[in-house]
């Protein structure tokens, strides 16, 4: 997903918020299915790991089971679990929720791959400079502490201070390493804070420079997603397009507004994939010219 | 025009009765390069911290300290942040952003510079320091030397006119510290920034300084151009921190002007010779055998150790030299059995590390002190760490340190306390990684004597270091490491004479006549 | 990219917009009779609460030391998750709230979750987790005079916050799995999650027992040494 990677983080964030919110509000298996397919396509395009995909499938199965067990609604009992009924409606509903959650897991996997810490800060900065500063410092400190914890535990081991392999002994030595790490971290933290003060932190309003320009393609992306979101949401608000599960499964009647909404949603979900493919074609064409 | 003037300046820390600075007077002109030196606790660091009001510790000040005619305490925080830069000892601690760009622009952002002003300055500074195109690199992936340069670059972004540095090279290897100092000289000469450096190791600083300041016991004992100050013999404590040419000049009593660096020293000492045994391999049983070892951190990574072989006998002191990232520390970790090589053999006293029983390996066979020895201390006082231990056989008396917190010790004291911890189990093989960091010359001498007496008791000692002077004092043999392997091993004298860079200054000046 | 130049107006908007939207979202939750939009509403509420906090937090200038101290705590909480057998996240959030104040406590809780999820996986549940741990830190700060009195109040607070965290996150579990939040289903979910709830509470008590006293001493030392 090179195109998505190079995109300004704001439209990317809007995309995620829009598709997850819309599909959750509609809660319609057809919408959910489209979202799942597009999420898997994005996952494949960003070269997601097979192991991650397998773990999402496990999540799918688990969520699918939860609803029929918990929910006692629905008019069509298929089998009984002790004395509680498992209904067809609850199964269908569970299938939809499971697919929705799995789609969101796939989407967030892609999100985590495209929105790195730098972009996260960029997204956070307009809301709160202090919070962004804190997150930036945490992002710097956390890996540093993980490394230092290893250094301390190696050093302790090499001096023969580490106890045996039993669980209480390991817990004790873990706590000792963590305690030493904390002393180190607090001590260094003060130096870091003083160095921030030396460089003028807190003397006035902090300015913010973005390294992510708004390219023309980002504007197109924003415009497209806002338009599609509106096209998807407005017909659904004006006309009743809701999918009823209980007591009996009742899909909304086919109508023009529903068709518009569904088409807009499908286009919106596939927007990054579409942009990625056109971008690939464009580059192929550009390369031929070069 | 004076940029900084002190008149009868005194300072006493909040919880102390003894003044850390007493009656200090001096003035520094605009554009000068000043080196402050003297023993630990002499007041160098305190003086620098008084000049930068954000760093001033709790305590009482008397006398006057003026920055461009304005008392330092009356500068606004903004003025102080903008016009006085401060760089501390450990670069790792000063960096607060996870990316190079964020760190570089930190000061400009804090002072609310607009984008154009900040980026213009950032472009210049990044080009000067070689950070162009590296803005989105992670700061954690930079080497120690680059980290220190980044801190310096970030400090310079707001165009300070005075730059203060508190022992900036004490954590760096010789190559990186030479880089840093040549950058400081450029900043001083090309940008006109006044620079004040407090440092133990003055070997590269003395010849580039416009003035040196000797501080001892909270007082300035001498201040002026280096040639002038060194026209007579300084006190022993100050002399021990001076570069080798200066020390040799006063020790040998040669006539003429005092040479400030190796280049000048060559003229004075070219015919000088001194007979000293070369050192030799000890013929005891092998204590550590490393045979064709290969190691990498993960399967996809590149080899850190590549066909490394090394044998150290009982009673031998072996130094290993080599640039940063050549695998020295990894080799020590493998020797201590902490890392398992994927190919090749490591044997300690004829047995593989895995053949030792639980608690046997680190309870009398081998001890390792890593580069950052603070990891050895997990309690709140030094005394707690030694609780119940038998202190009789230790080479240093650590009991005076018992009441103190490990982080309140000086660098040298911390190293000594850690060495004693490592000796508690009476190891037969001692592995040390840069053990003399933060030690002043007199402590270093005691340290090398302690190592020699351990070795004569049959302990094998392997030291990874950049400290050629220490090696010349106590090593039997030295090895050179390069690109994951040991490329040569020789008795110390032969090793030093054969090298151009990893050798002592004396050896360089005398062309091998002495080491 | 500054749309509104006036500083005060911008702050006002930053606070007002999430505040109004939170109200609107809550109103929707009450009046949406088909009870199907709970997932969206919970997530939106959580997000808005975070924005509201962030905007308020920015208005108060906090010194570099307090900010870094917060970052150190959050980073320790994240790093602690990598040490075998040690999961000190909630315990550290509580300690930081007690010693560095309510706002910093919230900030530590929220950022610790956000950053550790960079490694352990962000998702739509992230805002909920951020809010719940943030609140745990916040109330630790509010109750700080009480909690500082001894280890026992601290341990009790740890147990209570373990239960609170589990109950709070179960709202999300129920909303996302069944689409509606009826009391019966919520009760059922709480019943099924009881073992987890108990383990959260016990873990918090254990880690607070291990960590709170040494951290108190460490922070006292830092305060003495550097004059905080």
Image: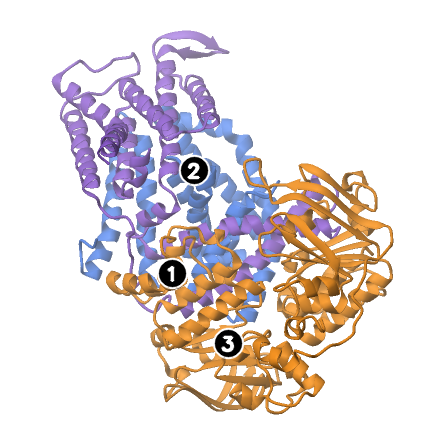
B305 w.r.t. B205: above or below: above
Q: Residues within 10 Å of mark 1 (few under 14, many from 20)?
A: many
Q: Is residue B316 left or right of residue A271?
A: right
Callouts 1 and 2 on one subunit: no
What residue is pinned by disc 3?
B197
For chain A, what colour was chosen? purple
Q: How far from the left and from the top, in percent, is residue B291?
A: 74, 42
**Can you tell which chain is drawn orange?**
B
Nearer the observer, B394 or B503: B503
Q: Nearer the viewer, mark 1 or mark 2?
A: 1
Q: How far from the left and from the top, in percent, is residue A125?
A: 31, 52
What residue is pinned by disc 2?
C168
Q: How far from the left and from the top, in percent, is residue B36?
A: 54, 80
Nearer the observer, B132 or C39: B132
**Can you tell which chain is drawn blue?**
C
How far apart are labels 1 and 2 at the CA level?
Answer: 41 Å
Q: Tell me the residue at 54%/51% (across/down).
A: A145
Residue C65 appears in the picture as rendered: no
Instruction: Give the tally of numbered discs.
Output: 3
Q: How far from the left and from the top, in percent, is residue C74?
A: 48, 51
What residue is pinned by disc 1?
B104
Quadrant in which residue B383 is drawn: bottom right
Instruction: Give the position of the N terminus of chain B as an image quadrant.
Output: bottom left
Q: Is residue B328 left or right of residue B180?
A: right
**Which chain letter goes with mark 2?**
C
**Which chain letter goes with mark 3?**
B
How far apart are labels 3 and 2 at the CA level?
Answer: 55 Å
């Amino acid at each position: 997903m090179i195109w998505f990677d190079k995109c300004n983080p704001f439209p990317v964030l809007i995309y995620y918020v829009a598709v997850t919110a819309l599909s959750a509000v509609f809660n319609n298996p057809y919408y959910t299915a489209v979202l799942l397919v597009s999420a898997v396509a994005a996952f494949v395009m960003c070269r997601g790991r097979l192991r991650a995909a397998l773990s999402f499938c496990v999540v799918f199965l688990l969520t699918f089971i939860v609803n029929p067990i918990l929910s006692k609604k629905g008019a069509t009992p298929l089998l009984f679990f002790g004395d509680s009924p498992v209904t067809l409606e609850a199964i269908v509903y569970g299938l939809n929720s499971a697919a929705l959650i799995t789609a969101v897991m796939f989407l967030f996997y892609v999100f985590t791959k495209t929105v790195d810490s730098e972009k996260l800060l960029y997204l956070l900065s307009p809301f709160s400079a202090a919070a962004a500063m804190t997150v930036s410092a945490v992002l710097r400190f956390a890996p540093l502490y993980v490394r230092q914890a290893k250094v301390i535990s190696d050093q302790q081991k090499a001096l023969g201070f580490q106890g045996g392999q039993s669980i209480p002994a390991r817990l004790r030595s873990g706590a000792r390493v963590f305690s030493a790490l904390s002393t180190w971290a607090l001590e260094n933290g003060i130096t870091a804070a003083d160095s921030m003060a030396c460089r003028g932190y807190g003397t006035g309003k902090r300015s913010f420079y973005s390294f992510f320009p708004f390219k023309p393609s980002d504007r197109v992306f924003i415009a497209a997603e806002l338009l599609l979101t509106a096209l998807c949401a407005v017909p659904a608000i004006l006309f009743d397009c809701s999918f009823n599960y209980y007591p009996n499964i009742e899909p909304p009647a086919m109508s023009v507004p529903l068709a518009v909404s569904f088409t807009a949603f499908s286009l919106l979900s596939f927007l990054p994939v579409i942009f990625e493919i056109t971008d690939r074609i464009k580059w192929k064409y550009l390369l031929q010219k070069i | 025009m004076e940029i900084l003037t002190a008149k009868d300046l005194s300072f006493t820390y909040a919880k102390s009765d003894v003044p850390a600075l007493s009656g200090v007077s001096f003035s520094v002109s605009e554009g000068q390069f000043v080196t402050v030196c003297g023993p630990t606790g002499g007041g160098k660091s305190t003086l620098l911290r008084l000049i930068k009001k954000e760093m001033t510790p709790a305590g009482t000040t008397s006398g006057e300290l003026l920055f461009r005619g304005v008392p330092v305490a009356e500068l606004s925080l903004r003025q102080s942040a903008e016009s006085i830069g401060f760089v501390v000892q450990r670069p790792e601690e000063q960096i607060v952003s996870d990316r190079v760009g964020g760190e570089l622009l930190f000061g400009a952002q804090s002072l609310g510079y607009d984008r154009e002003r900040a980026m213009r300055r950032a472009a210049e500074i990044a080009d000067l320091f070689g950070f162009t195109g590296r803005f989105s690199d992670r700061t954690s992936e930079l080497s120690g030397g680059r980290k220190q340069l980044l801190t310096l670059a970030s400090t310079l972004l707001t165009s300070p006119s005075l730059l203060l540095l508190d022992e900036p090279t004490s954590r760096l290897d010789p190559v990186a510290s030479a880089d840093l100092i040549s950058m400081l000289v450029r900043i001083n000469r090309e940008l006109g920034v006044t620079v004040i450096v407090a440092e133990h190791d003055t070997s590269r600083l003395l010849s580039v300084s416009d003035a040196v300041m000797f501080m001892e016991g909270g007082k300035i004992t001498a201040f002026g151009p280096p040639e002038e100050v060194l026209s007579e013999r300084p006190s022993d404590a100050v002399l021990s921190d001076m570069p080798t040419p200066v020390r040799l000049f006063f020790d040998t009593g040669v006539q003429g002007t005092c040479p400030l660096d190796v280049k000048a020293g060559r003229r004075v000492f070219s015919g000088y010779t001194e007979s000293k045994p070369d050192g030799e391999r000890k013929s005891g049983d092998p204590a550590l055998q490393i045979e064709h070892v290969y190691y990498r951190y993960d399967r996809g990574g590149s080899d850190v150790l590549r066909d490394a072989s090394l044998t150290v006998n009982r009673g031998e002191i072996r130094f290993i030299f080599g640039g940063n990232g050549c695998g020295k520390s990894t080799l020590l970790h493998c020797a201590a059995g902490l890392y398992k090589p994927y190919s090749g053999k490591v044997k300690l006293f004829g047995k593989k590390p895995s053949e030792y029983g639980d608690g046997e390996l680190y309870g009398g066979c081998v001890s390792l002190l890593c580069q950052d020895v603070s990891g050895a201390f997990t309690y709140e006082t030094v005394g707690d760490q030694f609780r119940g231990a038998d202190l009789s056989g230790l080479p240093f008396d650590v009991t005076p340190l018992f009441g103190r917190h490990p982080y309140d010790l000086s660098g040298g004291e911390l190293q000594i306390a850690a060495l004693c911890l490592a000796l508690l189990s009476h190891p037969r093989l001692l592995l040390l990684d840069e053990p003399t960091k933060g030690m002043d010359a007199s402590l270093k001498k005691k340290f090398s004597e302690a190592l020699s007496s351990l070795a004569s008791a049959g302990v094998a000692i392997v030291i990874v270091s950049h400290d050629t002077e220490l090696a010349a004092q106590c090593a039997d043999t030295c090895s050179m490491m390069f690109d994951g392997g040991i490329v040569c091993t020789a008795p110390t004298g032969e090793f030093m004479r054969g090298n151009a860079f990893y050798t002592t200054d004396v050896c360089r000046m005398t062309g091998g006549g002495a080491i | 990219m500054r749309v509104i130049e006036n500083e005060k107006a911008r702050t006002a908007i930053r606070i007002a917009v999430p505040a109004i939207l939170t109200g609107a979202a809550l109103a929707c939750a009450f009046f949406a009779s088909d009870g199907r939009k709970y997932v969206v509403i919970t997530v939106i509420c959580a997000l808005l609460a975070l924005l509201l906090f962030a905007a308020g937090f920015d208005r108060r200038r906090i010194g570099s030391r307090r900010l870094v101290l917060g970052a150190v705590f959050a980073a320790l909480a994240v790093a602690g998750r990598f040490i075998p057998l040690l999961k000190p996240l909630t315990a550290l959030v509580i300690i930081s709230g007690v010693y560095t104040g309510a706002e910093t406590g919230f900030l530590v809780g929220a950022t610790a979750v956000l950053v550790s999820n960079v490694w352990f996986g962000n998702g739509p549940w992230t805002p909920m987790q951020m809010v719940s741990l943030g609140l745990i830190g916040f109330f630790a700060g509010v109750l700080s005079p009480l909690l500082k009195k001894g280890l026992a109040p601290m341990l009790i607070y740890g147990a209570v916050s373990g239960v609170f965290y589990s109950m709070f996150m179960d709202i999300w579990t129920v909303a996302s799995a069944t689409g509606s939040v009826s009391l019966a289903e919520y009760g059922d979910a709480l019943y099924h999650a009881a073992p987890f709830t108990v383990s959260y509470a016990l873990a918090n008590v254990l880690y607070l027992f291990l960590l709170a006293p040494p951290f108190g001493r460490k922070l006292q030392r830092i305060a003495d040494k550097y004059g905080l």
